[in-house]
Image (cartoon, rainbow, N blue to C red):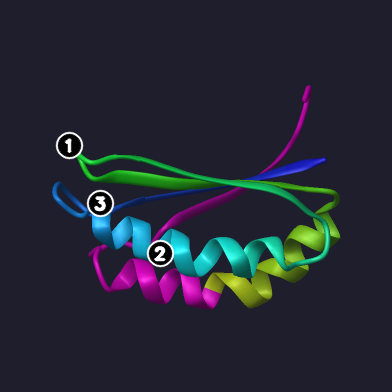
Amino acid sequence: MFARLVRFSFGPGKRDAARKLAKELVPLITSQPGSQSVTVFGDAEDGEYGIFVLWDSVAQASAAAEIVSPRLQELVAAHSETPADIRLFEVISP
């Protein structure tokens, strides 16, 4: 199992933008083969947000990234001056 962690900063007062991103991306992510779960999280006070996704395999996570990442980057760019930090980790213990 693998975990994709995406972090991005919208700045304070952008909770609605983060909710819009979640509303669009969560169905896209969950429709990808190998997606186990998606959690969108954040802090409205400092404007730091993120997405945590569990994947069955590296291959499935990589294939999904080809589809999801362009839209993710587009949505983040609309509200942030820096691109999202995207990492993939092996799950050591569920």
Q: Which residues are magenta?
A: 70-94
Q: Residues within 10 Å of mark 2 (few under 14, many from 20)?
A: some
Image location (x, y in percent) of residue 78: 27, 73
Image location (x, y in percent) of residue 29: 64, 63
Answer left or right for 41 relative to 88.
left
Query: Where does label 2 land, which residue?
Result: 21
Cα–Cα gap, marks 2 and 3: 10 Å
Residue 15 badge: 3
Residue at image position (78%, 22%) is: 93
Cα–Cα gap, marks 1 and 2: 18 Å
* Amino acid type shown at disc 3: Arg
Q: Quadrant of residue 69?
A: bottom right
- Please name whichever residue, 92 or 14, is drawn nearer the observer in this view of the structure: 14
Residue 45 badge: 1
Residue 91 badge: none
Callout 1: helix, strand or loop?
A: loop
Image location (x, y in percent) of residue 33: 82, 64
| Quadrant position of the N terminus in the picture | top right
Give yes or no for residue 15 being in the magenta stretch.
no
Answer left or right for 22 relative to 33.
left
Residue at image position (76%, 70%) is: 63
Mark 3 or mark 2, which is nearer the start of the sequence? Answer: 3
Examine the rendered structure and indicate whether residue 31 appears above or below residue 5: below
Mark 2 or mark 1, which is nearer the start of the sequence? Answer: 2
Mark 1 or mark 3, which is nearer the start of the sequence? Answer: 3
Residue at image position (60%, 66%) is: 27
Examine the rendered structure and indicate whether residue 1 appears above or below residue 84: above
Examine the rendered structure and indicate whether residue 40 appears above or below residue 16: above
Give yes or no for residue 86 being in the magenta stretch.
yes
